[in-house]
Image (cartoon, grey):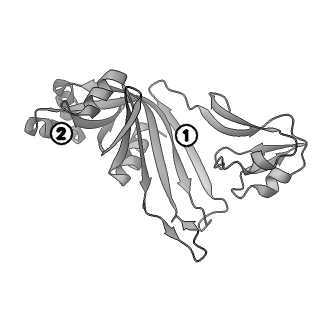
Amino acid sequence: MDIAEIYDKFDQIGCLTFATIDKDTPQTRIAHLFAHDHEGLYFRTMITKPFYEQLKQAGKVSICGMFPKTSVSHDEQGMPYFAPGYTIRATGDAKEISLEQLKEKAAANQMFMLGVKDIERYPAMTTFCLHSAWGEVYDFDFEMAHRSHKLLRTGFCFGGKYIPFRGVRITEECIACGECLEKCSFKAIYQQGERYIIDHAKCDVCGDCYTICPAGAIEIVMDDPKK
């Protein structure tokens, strides 16, 4: 995915959750993205707000949202039901953009003019660019109404970041018993020769395979640049 495609996914949602760190405490607020270009994704805040201070101190932000609904309904058995949709998140480094820089961008791209007008109206406002980030689109259809599997995850990165692998995978200790395949309701496991493989694009990391494997052949991975 390129930055324009990432922006469009976020823009469909509109109001997003932005997370930062205040010393050792996580903080969140609702905001939105207003523009994008080859350098990254752009958002605004006021220099008088804690959000600004946290961005300046740590230079880090994480953004997420859900489309088309955030509400939860329940089926006849009382189980939660989610209509097909997606979540998207992006985490990375943010830098402040001056009004002069913003005006230069607006001269070439009208999308940035909103930011210029907003700052001219509210002088305490400023702009930040998420210029280096990684994330993913989590496209879900849990009832498999439109396809043969529940989930499709698409990772992305830009600005020099890589996509870390966090999940579960089957090691060489696999004895090919097939119990994980039978247990996986996400249809994320397939057989390759005498071993079973997890398709990470379809895996929810629910842990069913991990708990049922009799050989202990499934490992939990928290951050690995290589799948």
Q: Nearer the viewer, residue 157 or 217?
A: 217
Q: Secondary structure at mark 1?
A: strand
Query: What is the distance, in whole Å, between disc 2 and disc 1 at their CAs?
Result: 30 Å
Q: Of the residues shown, which amino acid type is indicated by label 1?
A: Gly
The mark total stands at 2
The residue most toward the bottom is: 76
Q: Which residue is mark 1?
A: 155
- Residue 193 lies left or right of residue 210; in this view the side is right
* Residue 93, x across and y down, in percent: 40, 26
The residue drawn where x is 17% and y is 27% is: 99
Q: Nearer the viewer, mark 2 or mark 1?
A: 1
Q: Nearer the viewer, residue 158 or 17?
A: 17
* Residue 45, x across and y down, in percent: 23, 36
* Number of the label disc, if any, that sits on residue 167: none
The residue drawn where x is 56% and y is 74% is: 75
Q: Earlier in the sequence, mark 2 or mark 1?
A: 2
* Residue 152, x across and y down, in percent: 60, 51
Neighbor class of circle 2 (other Cα within 10 Å; few <14, some 14-19, many 20+) is some
Q: Secondary structure at mark 2?
A: helix
Q: Nearer the viewer, residue 106 or 10?
A: 10
Q: Which residue is mark 2?
A: 113
The residue drawn where x is 52% and y is 64% is: 82
